[in-house]
Amino acid sequence: MAHTDDDHAHHSHSHAHSHTGGFSDDDAALAAVEGHHAHMLERVSALSDALLAAVAAGDAGTAYDEKANLVGWCEDELIPHAVAEEGPLYGPARETAEARLLVEGMLQDHQTIIGLVEELRGADGPRAAALGLAIARAFALHLRKENQLLFPYIVASPDLSLAKAVEGLEEVVG
C-alpha cells in the first residue's frame, strides 16, 4: 500500500487557482487547503488502520510493511507539509496578539507529531499500532485547529491573507 502518484488522481485539482498566479481570494485558498487536509487525513487514517489490522491479525511481516508505509508517508508527506506551513502560513498570524498563543500551540503539535513518527520508526507490534493511531488522531486534532480556528481567523483579518500565505506551497495545497 505504498504511496504513489495515483493517490493524487482522486484529489481534485479543479480549484480556482494556479500555482503560478496564486489564488483568486482567501475563500479559494481555504477550499484548496481544506481539500488537501481531508485527503491527507484520509490517507494517514487508512495507513494507521492497515498497521493496526496487521498487528491485530498477528501478521508480523505485513505489520512490518505497513509500518514502513506509514513512516514513509509521514516522512514524505506529513512532516514536509507541517514544516511548509510554519513560515508563510503561521508566521504572519503569530505576529498578532489574538493568534499568537494558538500558533505557539500548533507549532507544539508539529513537534509532537514528529516525535511520534520518530518513536514509531523504532517500534513494533502493539506499540507500533498504538503509535500509528496516535499519529492519525493527533493529526486530525491539529487539522481541526487549523480549519476551525486559525484559517477562519486569517480569512477574517484584514491585515492577513490566506491566499498570499499559501501561494506556491505545493505541500499545503496539493
Image (cartoon, helix red, strand yellow):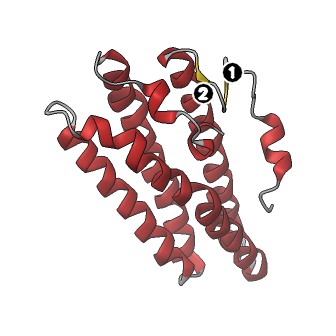
55 vs 160, nearest the viewer:
160
Q: Secondary structure at mark 1?
A: loop
61 vs 158, nearest the viewer:
158
| The C terminus - image quarter | top right
Q: Position of residue 83 (x, y in %)?
A: 46, 56
What's under tag 1, amino acid-wise? His
Give the side of residue 67 with respect to residue 130, left or right: right
Rounded to the nearest whole Å, what is the CA distance between mark 2 and mark 1? 6 Å
Q: Position of residue 5 (x, y in %)?
A: 83, 50
What residue does disc 2 label? 32
Q: Quadrant of residue 18?
A: top right
Q: Secondary structure at mark 2?
A: helix
What residue does disc 1 label? 15
Residue 108 vertical placement versus 159 (above, below)? below
Q: Quadrant of residue 3?
A: bottom right
Residue shown at 65% from the left, 65% from the top: 70
Task: Please report contact status of discs 2 and 1: CB closer than 8 Å, yes or no.
Answer: yes
